[in-house]
Amino acid sequence: MVDLSNLKLVDEVIEVADDAAYVDATEFGPPPDEGVYTFAQGRPTFNATDKGYLQALMSHKFVGGDQDGKDFPFDRISNKPFERQGVRVSMMQDHLRALGDRTSYRSHQDYAAALEAAEGKPFKAVLQWEGGCHHEGTPQECDWTDGRVFRVRGARNFPQNGSGKPQTEIKCPVCSATVQARARINRRIAAS
């Protein structure tokens, strides 16, 4: 039997629809074009990274343009500091600055409170396409952290169709699997 005693799990009442009402997952549609978009920040959920920094997971909504009202899922930021041009910064601070919040937070609790208070507020960010393959089910299979993972970043690196627009799929040169493009927030734009 699998030992789950070391995991912090929710109570055992796990309610999902029965088979007759269950909705199966579908493929993701094509990603939005790369570019600058306005989003309404979604409700954050928090956990700790493996290094002990605060991580926030959010799903946002597009505001305006041809994507207006659509969901943008799976945004992840943390307050882990790194250096940019010799200055210590974090993705979480970038996000708060994009919301217009210039406060220098010093605790995980303060960061979490600021993100919770920002739910629904607009921010601008740059979307970029990316895709990856870790060769699942093949002799070349590797962990996502391995250097052998095939990665593509930027729509310009996906094959072009007949009209010069990027296709949303590319074949992995290692295992020939189809790699689907997805959009991710590449950079948040600080509010003025």
Image (cartoon, grey):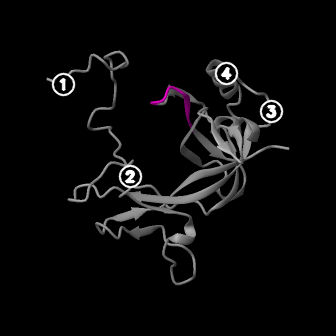
Q: Quadrant of the C terminus?
A: top right
For residue 189, above or below residue 48: below
Q: Where is residue 19 in the image (x, y as percent from the top left)?
A: 26, 37
Q: Where is residue 95 in the image (x, y as percent from the top left)?
A: 69, 39
Type of amino acid at the residue the image marks with label 3: Arg
What kind of element bears circle 1? loop
Type of amino acid at the residue the image marks with label 2: Thr
Task: Tell me which residue sits at (76%, 38%) in the image.
Answer: 97
- The alpha-carbon separation of the residues under discs 4 and 2 comes to 35 Å
Q: Nearer the viewer, residue 125 or 60?
A: 125
Which residue position holds label 3? 102
Say if mark 2 contacts mark 1, CB within 8 Å: no
**Callout 4 environment at 10 Å: few (<14), some (14 to 19), or many (20+)?**
few
Horizontal side, residue 41 vs residue 99: left or right: left
Say if mark 2 contacts mark 3, CB within 8 Å: no
Task: Write down the region rendered in magenta.
Answer: 50-58
Answer with mark 4 or mark 1, whichever residue precedes in sequence: 1
For residue 123, above or below residue 33: above
Q: Position of residue 168 (x, y in %)?
A: 48, 67
Which residue position holds label 4? 113
For residue 22, above or below residue 187: above
Q: Residue 26 carries which label?
A: 2
- The alpha-carbon separation of the residues under discs 2 and 1 comes to 30 Å
Q: Which mark is residue 2?
A: 1
- The alpha-carbon separation of the residues under discs 3 and 1 comes to 47 Å
